[in-house]
Image (tube, rainbow, N blue to C red):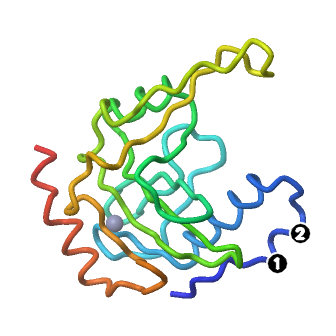
Amino acid sequence: MNLHFNQSLAANYKSEPQKIRVLSEDWVANQSYCPNCDAEPLAEFTNNKPVADFYCANCNEQYELKSKQAKLSNIINDGAYDTMIERISSDNNPNFFFLTYSQEYSVNNFLIIPKHFFKPDMIVKRKPLLVSAKRAGWVGCNIDLRQVPESGKVFLVKNQQVIPRDNVTEQFQKTLFLRQ
Ligand SMILES: [Zn+2]
């Protein structure tokens, strides 16, 4: 597993969020594997499919990717509140990958939180945007990871160390009984 983003892809993107989206998705598609069954590579859904970003063609698990620079924190700033609640309450809710990367565009942490650890009360409403904002009234959310037990945080990369794949799949599968 190479921890560096392929920066040659970045040239075409001026906006930083767009660039990060492309680089981090490319990294997952090329360097990652399915934490449930160890199959690789993960397949990408076509763009703008609201369900998830990746799926495993072998076991059909679905994965959504959240990336951010800097340290891994317990509060993750995310998109629209209603969309998120709808998504995690649906029958085909995805597992969530969280990726943090350094200023040098290399992966610091990459973990999977299996979907059965996501509960609506972990999704915290932010204040609506002010009337003066472009999207006035829009309500975003924060994901509060403090409610996820350690067993629900399965690291594939931790502090730039790649975790052996056997450990990852074992930890992922250990809590699958919670889905019943
Ligand atoms: Zn799989």
> Residue flagged by tag 2: what amino acid is it?
Ala
Return the x and y of residue 32 as percentages of the image width and height: 48, 75
Q: Residue 70 sits in which quadrant?
A: bottom right
> Residue flagged by tag 1: what amino acid is it?
Ser
Residue 106 disc label: none
Asked if disc 1 and disc 2 are in contact, CB closer than 8 Å, the reply is yes
Q: Is residue 21 rendered to the left or right of residue 54?
A: right
Residue annotated with mark 1: 8
Q: Nearer the viewer, residue 65 or 51?
A: 65
Q: How many marks?
A: 2
Query: Real-space Cα distance between discs 1 and 2?
Result: 6 Å
Return the x and y of residue 14 as percentages of the image width and height: 89, 56
Secondary structure found at label 2: helix
Residue 11 disc label: 2
The quarter of the image holding the C terminus is: top left
Q: Is residue 9 rendered to the left or right of residue 38?
A: right
Residue displayed at 33% across by 56% down: 113
Q: Is residue 70 rendered to the left or right of residue 117?
A: right
Q: Nearer the viewer, residue 68 or 164?
A: 68
Residue displayed at 47% across by 72% down: 109
Return the x and y of residue 67 as percentages of the image width and height: 57, 58
Return the x and y of residue 105 as percentages of the image width and height: 69, 75
Ligand 1 quarter of the rendering = bottom left
Q: Is residue 57 rendered to the left or right of residue 25?
A: left
Residue displayed at 86% across by 59% down: 13
Secondary structure found at label 1: helix
Ligand 1: does it lie within 8 Å of the C-beta at label 1?
no
Residue displayed at 58% across by 40% down: 49
